Amino acid sequence: MTSSPSPDPKNNRMPLSAAFIVGNEAAERFSYYGIRSILAGYITGQVVGGSHGGLGQTADTATSIIHLFIFANYFMPLLGAWLSDRLIGRYYTILYVSMVYALGNGVLACSGFFDTVSAKMACLAVGLGLIAFGSGGIKPCVSAFMGDQFKPEQRHLLQKAYAAFYWSINFGSFFSFLVVPWVKDKEGYAWAFGVPGVLMVIAVLIFWLGTKHYTRVPPARHTNTAGFLKVFLSAFRLQPKLTLAPVINILASLGLPALAMVALTVVALMHDVTPFARGLGGTALVGVGVWYLLIVAMSLTGRLELPDAFWQAAARRHSEAEVSAARSVGPILFVFALVPVFWALFDQTTSTWVLQGKKMVPFDVFGLTIGAEQMQSANPALVMVLVPLLTLGVYPLLGRLATPLRRMGAGMFFGAASFVIVAWLQQRIEAGEQLSVLWQTVPYLVLTTGEVLLSTTGLEFAFAEAAPAMPAQSELLVADGGARQSAGHWHHQGSPGAGAEDASVSPSRFLLYAALTAVVGVLFSLVAVRYRYRHPTFKAQAGEA
């Protein structure tokens, strides 16, 4: 998002508070991705004495545990968003939940004090549970808190601010993918899990040091601001006659996704693939498919947003700002509803891509051996190059062609292409070729380009398009996460053949992921074409002004 600089020089400078948020994010992401970088190896590693031993589980078990952990990370933001918007505000949510996060790191590191696999598994379960609560709980709050630091006359800085924010995420994760596996090789898993714990404590300290500089938006219980559902119900009850349009709209925005998420959550928490789990998971995924088709149908018929007459009824009980905020929710949620598939498959880089890399040949760079776990650092390294390249070079060059939703749609197709390449590599491996793990740089480049197009743009789009008075703004910022892991986790557990050893690492599975992402990319593009921007800069760029 670009716009004219403010005449006041003070409004053309980043607020100091943003620096503390960026620093906190870099340290927190080092902690999170440091843990994830060694999880697959730890769970599948051979059981040996001392701190270097793993848990001796199968590759499919490792994939299930990792995706259940990631699923929890993208479910907990719902709780974090509720805490921040309704009860204690974003500042205290980030501070207190981060402390729980650090505690989880400590529990995980304590696995080194135990010798039995069962005790280590208990530490893994408790530690990952606390970390998921902490990481997920702060997820919707930090990005929204960043946006809070900018006054209306500083909104032209948001694109660069969110680019810097996303750059810091990858700065932290880049070094974590190099440092934590190295510590694991030298000192064992207990110390390797301990290092991310230290970084999480540093993250909390950095955030606390910026306390006096922050702009804090009070939660809804202090402002008595009505949320989306309250305004919608008021409008619905005050309609002169009942019509199907609002019923279909609320079903598409809340009803179907809520039912599907509950069903997929139940399946994700079931360890055994029973007929009931298969049936429930399959039904839920059919529900997701119906939901997506409903969104596309509403978009093509111009009914993503309810008509003015519907919302005008709510004006009798609510302020103009509350009504404006409520009516902005549906269209934005419908856009983000199609994003979770990309992220569910993107997270394969820390599970199936690592497992594929373990069958490839490591290479040396300046005396450092780069294997499957270290290759994960390719993603953040590429992000640190691509963010400034795209933000400062490509987007301005493309001009009006690079509207936010076009960028996001292109990101999905880049993601689909990356899995085609991974499938090709897996086919060569299974044919007996000895491939260098350096080959994975190619799909990493393609996928990371898609990630930058989708993620940095999504942060900017959600904050700019959401009405300023909307108390659920952070829920919109987390909409690209949500329960994105539930579908991916069920697919791993419930698909035919998923119970076979290493079934999750095969050309056919990777091609299925590519096809799924491409189909959703087409659906996203259909919705994006009919979306009408609210932010004046976006409207001008799209030629809607």
Image: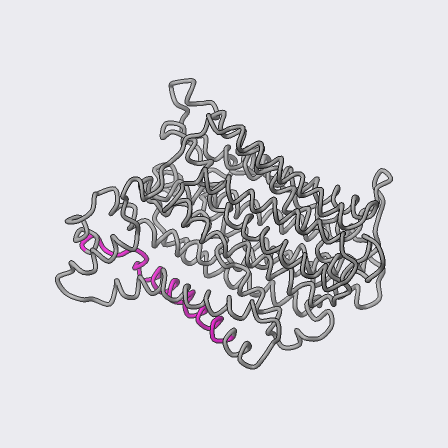
Q: Position of residue 540 (x, y in %)?
A: 36, 38
Please state the total of marks drawn on the protein image: 0
Residue closest to the eye, 508 or 268: 268
Residue 500 lies left or right of residue 89; in this view the side is right
Hey, which quadrant is residue 501 in on the image? bottom right
Residue at image coords 65%, 43%? 31
Residue furthest to the right in view is 367
Q: Is residue 194 magenta?
A: no
Q: Is residue 295 magenta?
A: yes
232 up-or-down from 16: above or below: below
Query: Residue 165 at what x, y percent from top left?
Result: 54, 36
**Figure quadrant of residue 471:** top left
- The x, y position of residue 374, in whole percent, is 75, 47
Instruction: Name the dominant secondary structure of the magenta segment.
Output: helix
Which of the 4 image quadrants contains residue 504?
A: bottom right
Q: Foreground residue, 532 or 456?
A: 456
Q: Quadrant of the N terminus?
A: top left
Closer to the camera, 356 or 259?
A: 259
Residue 175 location (% of width, % of height): 70, 39
Q: Which residues are magenta?
A: 282-309
Give 81 or 376, whichever is nearer the viewer: 81
Quadrant (top left, top right, bottom left, bottom right) of the C terminus:
top left
User: Going 59% across and 36% down the picture, which residue do you hit?
Assistant: 203
Left or right relative to 148: residue 47? right
The residue lying furthest to the bottom in this view is 275
